[in-house]
Image (tube, grey):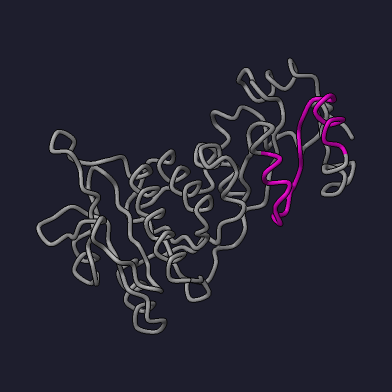
Amino acid sequence: MSGESHNPLLDMYRDLRHAQTLHTVSKVFLTDGEKITLTVLESELSIASILLTEDLFLKHEVLIRSRLSDEYILIMPKKEMDTLVGIDLHSPMMSITNTPPPSDLHSLKSPVIALNGIVNSDNVGGIIRNAIGLGFESIITDSTTSSPYLRRSVRVSMGSIAFAKCGFSQNLRQDLEQMKSEKGLKIISAEINSHSRSLNDYVFPQDFIVVLGSEGNGIEKDILAISDDIIHIPMDSRVKSLNVSSSSAIILHAARQRNQQCG
């Protein structure tokens, strides 16, 4: 165990404000803080290294040693960690975790959540936390959606990204149509328009894909065109819409209630 400054493993933690490109190219992601790092340690993901203070290592030694050999356990005083990462750490425990390969879209189990054009990583992380918390693990992100493995997204998800099955779609409309045809999944888009139905009156099918879009731009028109149903959350007229992360919690909770009642 070593936190010596010349250790090349520390390069992944150096100056976090500018480290995202290195993490993305290296196909790893960073967990920031005790709670988030513990969540990922308790998952099946491959941990590349862990950096923490001695007191936190002693607190979680059994779990850490069950996942990592000594050479990948980096112990350092908090002040030195702060200098290394370039920020004042509230909780001096973090890890570098190997990003899992994208799940094959056709292996994803229903229900599936598809994210269309959600560029805000806070929203992506919030949706994933809501999804895992409500029992949904199949996620599709498209080419216009922020990666769920960015540091901010991982942080907002509180590490629950570790339990998601994430697929990637280069052409979301095409992939949704294929999944609809081959797996019989109904496409449900969450959008307010003249054809949308109130969530209060909607009965979710057994197998479906729910599509969520950004609050600013909504869901792409070509995806709305192939949707079996379009639903909206009924709102007070003084508020036109909710943040997509908040909306996801309401919609997924309603879907879960339907599944429990029919299960």
List the single residue furthest toward the top: 79
List the single residue furthest toward the front: 261
Quarter of the image containing the N terminus?
top right
Q: Name the spot of residue 189 as percent of width and height, x first.
A: 27, 61
Q: Name the spot of residue 15 as percent of width and height, x first.
A: 61, 27
**Which region shows up in magenta?**
37-61
Closest to the observer: 29 or 135? 135
Magenta highlight on residue 234: no
Q: Quadrant of residue 238?
A: top left
**In the displayed structure image, the side of residue 230 where residue 60 appears, left or right:** right
Q: Name the spot of residue 115 as percent of width and height, x first.
A: 37, 56
Magenta highlight on residue 43: yes
Q: Quadrant of residue 64?
A: top right
List the single residue furthest toward the bottom: 182
- Residue found at x 54% / y 31%: 18
**In the displayed structure image, the side of residue 258 where residue 93 appears, left or right:** right
Q: Check the image and report above or below for 189 versus 128.
A: below
**In the displayed structure image, the side of residue 183 where residue 38 appears, left or right:** right
- Residue found at x 83% / y 38%: 73
Q: Name the spot of residue 43 as percent of width and height, x first.
A: 70, 52
